[in-house]
Image: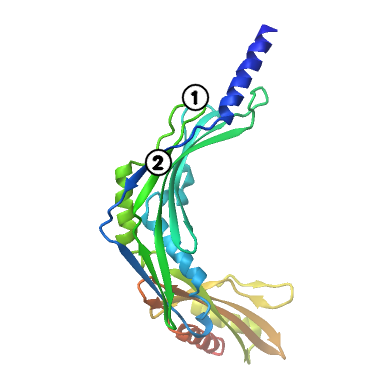
Amino acid sequence: MKKLGKLLVATSIFTLLAGCKSTPESTVINLQPTNTTKTLTFKKLDGDAANVVTLNSVKQAVVQHVKATSGFAHCDTSPRECNKKQNKGFEGVYNKWGRKVYINENQISLKYFNTEYTYNRGSSSPFGGSTSEYTSTIDTAFPYTISETADAFTVTIKSPANATTNKVRNPIFLPVGLPLKTSRVQELVNDVLELDTAETIPITHYVKKSGEFNVEYAPESVKANYVREYGDLGWNKASAGFLKSGRENVTSNGQSGNFELKIHLYRGNSKVEFDIKQQIKVLNNGTVQYDNGAFTKQIAEKLEQVAKS
């Protein structure tokens, strides 16, 4: 009976502590970045690529620029590297950390976080299967504007005046550490406003060209022509009776893409259907890696030439 009473008291105390989150201890960090603005320019496209550069795609590209230059990028690609256990065993206290980037109509919010959380497995624990989180943060925000002309979108990212630290305490009133040193915040803000991500963080899209043509050979002969030119394309026979290739990557004059083929029996000969996709890259320095459809036209002409060879 005494053991039960002690357990109930302990459970009540822990429940009370787990439900009580301390008021964050906040401080303001004044920032003086080397650069006061960062300009990103995204050129608009025409024709089949007219829908690639839009207000929404530009905003997402801006978010990617901030993510790439504000540190903790490895937490996006390898989350386990930013999630560690403080003690041995399955149950216990963990830490996860990193940064988050949000964009709204007039600012890009940057939040660095360090979260301490507990996980208890097993029904014998008063908190079996439950989690509780306590997060300390460093927050800042970059004001920005977007101007649009007939030719391009221009984004101007402005420097933040300050950052705010918010440090909390866990249920036993120990402080949850900040995700990084406050002196590092200035360096990362500088990186956002200085580093060049034009080549590494482009707006990437594919434009598609589809078509068909007739060939005065049987499907197997047409297939043999393609095998001689491109090697084994992973052909298979679909349930509808036509021959279908796998996806083949192709490059030409600095452009890249891929194609897929279908060969149908048609009036004793063949009909070839093709789908060609070309990769487009719009860089944030006003340049574009796109040739206005010359690549897809060239590949379509070659596919017909090979089929009829």
The residue singled out by tag 2 in the image is: 179
- The residue drawn where x is 68% and y is 12% is 4
Residue 64 in sight here: yes
In the visual, does 66 lie left or right of 183?
right
Image x and y of residue 292, in percent: 45, 85
- The residue drawn where x is 70% and y is 73% is 238
- The residue drawn where x is 66% and y is 77% is 243
Residue 254 is drawn in which quadrant?
bottom left
Image x and y of residue 138, in percent: 41, 45
Residue at disc 2, secondary structure: loop
In the visual, does 5 lie left or right of 252?
right
The residue singled out by tag 1 in the image is: 172
Residue 232 in sight here: no
Whether 74 is drawn above or below 7: the answer is below
Labels 1 and 2: the sequence-earlier one: 1
Separation of residues labelled 1 and 2 (CA atoms): 20 Å
Residue at disc 1, secondary structure: loop
Image x and y of residue 174, in percent: 44, 27
Image x and y of residue 222, in percent: 60, 84
Whether 140 is drawn above or below 286: the answer is above
**Which kind of residue does numbered mark 2 sit on?**
Pro
Number of numbered discs:
2
Q: Nearer the viewer, residue 292 or 226?
A: 292
Whether 184 is drawn above or below 173: the answer is below
Q: Residues within 10 Å of mark 1 (few under 14, many from 20)?
A: few
